[in-house]
Amino acid sequence: MSYLLDKKIKKKRFFYIIFGIIVCLILFFFRLSVFNGLSFVSNIIFRPVLVLGNSIGEKFENFRSFFAFKNSLYSENKSLKSKLEENSAMLANYNSVLVENVSLKEILGRKEARNNLILSAILAKPNQSPYDTLVIDAGTKQGLRAGDIVFAFGNVPVGRVSDVYPSSSKVILFSNAGEKTQTAVGEKKVFMEVAGRGGGNFEMIVPRDFTIVKGDVALLPGIFPYVLGVVEIIISDPRDPFIKALLVSPVNIQELKFVEVEIQ
């Protein structure tokens, strides 16, 4: 009896399997719309899950972007602080040398007396006038002449008067492309020529055996030192007997509103 029952169950199971196979073949070959219905039902069921997942993923992505941006700002701030400390150290060293230099000159009776400075407002800067030139509101009526040196903050030479008119003058900046200026460079104050590169930048070509490092200053020749530029980058090629030094002006012309002209 048990044997007949098992045989009947096996036949029924076999029938179900054959029936399932036939149904699958029909659906596969005839592409019934059942698949579309199943796809529609699946879309209704799983759509909220997918939308929620995308929303959470987007929020996590924004969260990660926020921290990446914050880390970028932190790194940039740290770099700027380091640069500021470096510049402050260089300025402190320069000020120390300057004070010592002035003290020695006062002892020797060569105290600087500069009563011939004419304060002048800047009428046009390089972004408004021809490249690396200024137009100032002082001219022949104030005693200016071509060749007078123009200073920023009273002690940083930035250019020379090239053309003078009754109430205005044109100033060629020392950093003007192609402008060449004699300077004293390094500890031994060796005379070297610097050439303007535009935008407050200079370059200087020196022999390879000439010692020059970042932070060295180029001074206008004279009894009183005026910094024209500071060495920022050294470019060297072992095959070249010369090295190139790139210098920058201590002041940003775009931030200036006034200059002083030293009349002769």
Image: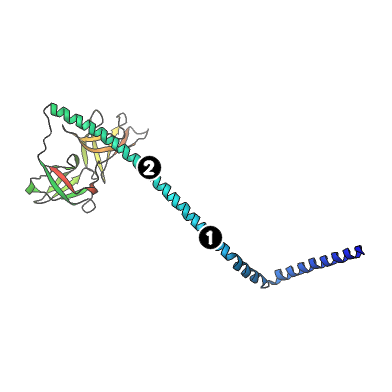
The mark found on residue 182 in the picture is: none
Asked if one can make out residue 190 in the rendered structure from this viewpoint, the answer is no
Is residue 18 positioned above or below 115 on the image? Answer: below
Instruction: Determine the image quadrant of residue 7.
Output: bottom right
Residue in the image at 83% along x and 67% along y:
12
Is residue 15 positioned above or below 58 on the image? Answer: below
Q: Position of residue 66 (x, y in %)?
A: 44, 52
Asked if one can make out residue 173 in the rendered structure from this viewpoint, the answer is yes
Residue 18 relative to residue 203: left or right: right
Of all residues, the one furthest to the right in this rendering is: 1
Q: For mark 2, give the secondary structure.
A: helix
How many neighbours does mark 2 have within 10 angstroms: few (below 14), some (14-19), or many (20 or more)? Answer: few
Residue in the image at 17% along x and 45% along y:
259
Residue in the image at 54% along x and 61% along y:
52
Instruction: Indicate the amino acid at tag 2.
Output: Lys
Of all residues, the one furthest to the top in this rendering is: 108
Instruction: Determine the image quadrant of residue 264.
Output: top left
Q: Which residue is mark 1?
A: 54
Residue placed most toward the observer, 73 or 249: 73
Residue 14 relative to residue 36: left or right: right
Q: Are the residues tagged 1 and 2 within 8 Å (C-beta)?
A: no
Instruction: Indicate the amino acid at tag 1.
Output: Asn
* Marks 1 and 2, the one that precedes in the sequence: 1
Residue in the image at 17% along x and 47% along y:
258
Residue placed most toward the observer, 44 or 106: 44
Q: Position of residue 8 (x, y in %)?
A: 87, 66
Q: Position of residue 216 (x, y in %)?
A: 28, 34
Q: For mark 1, give the secondary structure.
A: helix
Q: Quadrant of the N terminus?
A: bottom right
**Mark 1 to mark 2 CA distance (whole Å):** 36 Å
Q: Which residue is mark 2?
A: 78
